Image (cartoon, rainbow, N blue to C red):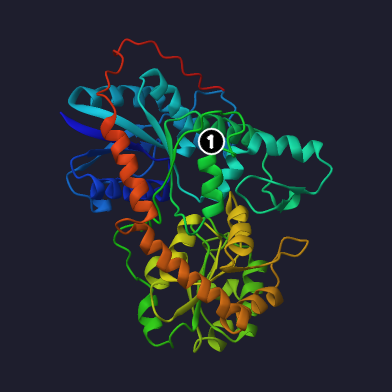
Amino acid sequence: MKDTIVLYPSIGRGHIFSMVELGKLILTHNPSFSITILIPTPPNSTTIEATTFGCDSSITFHHIPIPQPPSGTAVSPLSLIFHLTRNGNHNLHHVLQSISKTSNLKAIVLDFLNYTANEVTTTLDIPTFYYYTSGAASLCVLLYSKIIKQRKTEDSCNYLEIPGFPRISKEELPSYPEELENIFRDISANMSDCDGIIINTFNAAEERSIKALQEGSCFPDESNPPPVFCIGPVISVPGGEKDENECLSWLESQPSQSVVLLSFGSLGRFSKTQLKEIAIGLERSEQRFLWVVRSESDEDSLEDLLPEGFLDRTKEKGMVVRNWAPQAKILSHDSVGGFVTHCGWNSVLEAFSEGVPMVTWPLYAEQNLNRVVLVKEMKVALALEESENGIVSATELGDRVKELMDSEKGKEIRERVLKMKVSGVEARSEGGSSYVAMNRLIQLWKEKDHLSVLSPNTPLFYNFSD
């Protein structure tokens, strides 16, 4: 029977594509493995086909039906994804048993958001690893969340010292409802007690954070923390990126490194007020730009959303498209010299890989933590400041874009991020830190004994109402 590694991404195309890229990377280091990727599939969701990913026959896909929570279950929108995943545990249990009958199931890799699947893998005694799709620095904060909560309330000092993370004020830390804070502490506890943590980063980018993780100082309750494997940069790019708006054609007519890209991820939607501030700021900056606009309402046209005459006045220097553009291909184009980003980690890695300096505009999740690291630690980005009403003003945006594209500080940032690009290539090359870490992980899996999972009659107790 063939040795098999099972990968279980979280719900959402971005998480699935990232896990697929991990599967491809595993096979480049050990083609003898078989990879099975479990696709969580809630009711009424679009089925993602294997052909979407361009994988060979060594990677197979299996859909895990995710039922809705039982009626009467109190689930907030913020925690819905965690409850949905737990609802799929019964189906996950049977799928893993089925896989074990036809192959040597060596290990399972869980997206860290799928932490409740640990209830199944522990019951079946399957070696369990977590894949953290963001950076090492934000993982340090997540793992240290229990101590952070204590110090936020008990310590009178406004600043917090977190192992592996830059000194940070309490105001800079993301604020979450208590329900989510409890979930994050559960994730931290599960990751602290697993067989290994895989992180999509590389040593040259986050040396201090990685050292703190490897030494165990971010695991406050663990005397024997799990091994950490930093295997990035792994870039997750959806297949078949079509340039429907002809962005790349437009870039061909622009001077080298003259265009700033503004793109904020699939959830980066703005109000009309904020969009108009961005437009005014771009016009005042006098820089060339390519702007991907997502608004709170898809029904409004660009003319409705932007200042009157803006599109005509900027047509020689700017291009504005609705909703989507092939971001990775745009960042790789020679004409692009800057990137205003929401600090999603995949976008950050894309910028690293192409040597593009950034202006940071975090919107949600761990993105503010990424901003702190990019600006304070790595010094490869500038920070945008919001006003008291939560709006980034036209003046602030225009000044930061101009500073990035046309100042000595901008040039210094560009030089540092170009060094990051070289370091990322070296990390993934033979003998590099990520290459060595991936081989170490592969060897650990190869040494695992064949698993004999429990019989189908093993009682399982999954509490969907927790």
**Residue 324 seen in the current view:** no
Which quarter shows the C terminus?
A: top right
- At mark 1, the secondary structure is helix
Q: How many marks?
A: 1
Residue positioned 31% across, 59% down in the render: 429
Relative image position of residue 248 (x, y in whole percent):
37, 77
Relative image position of residue 304 (x, y in whole percent):
58, 72
Q: Is residue 428 left or right of residue 171?
A: left
The front one of 327 and 147 is 147
**Amino acid found under the numbered disc labelled 1:** Leu
Q: Does residue 217 sit above or below 21 in this rendering?
A: above
Relative image position of residue 373 (x, y in whole percent):
60, 58
Q: Is residue 340 left or right of residue 4?
A: right
**Residue 107 seen in the current view:** yes
Q: Does residue 223 sit above or below 334 in this rendering?
A: above
Residue positioned 36% across, 20% down in the render: 125
Mark 1: give few (<14), some (14-19) or many (20+) Cα within 10 Å. some
Q: Is residue 177 left or right of residue 11?
A: right
Relative image position of residue 12 (x, y in whole percent):
43, 46
The front one of 447 and 379 is 447
Residue positioned 57% across, 88% down in the render: 313
Residue under pointer 1: 80
Q: Does residue 328 sit above or below 166 in this rendering?
A: below
Q: Is residue 5 left or right of residue 75?
A: left
**The quarter of the displayed image where residue 287 is located:** bottom right
Residue positioned 47% across, 38% down in the render: 112
Which quarter shows the N terminus?
A: top left
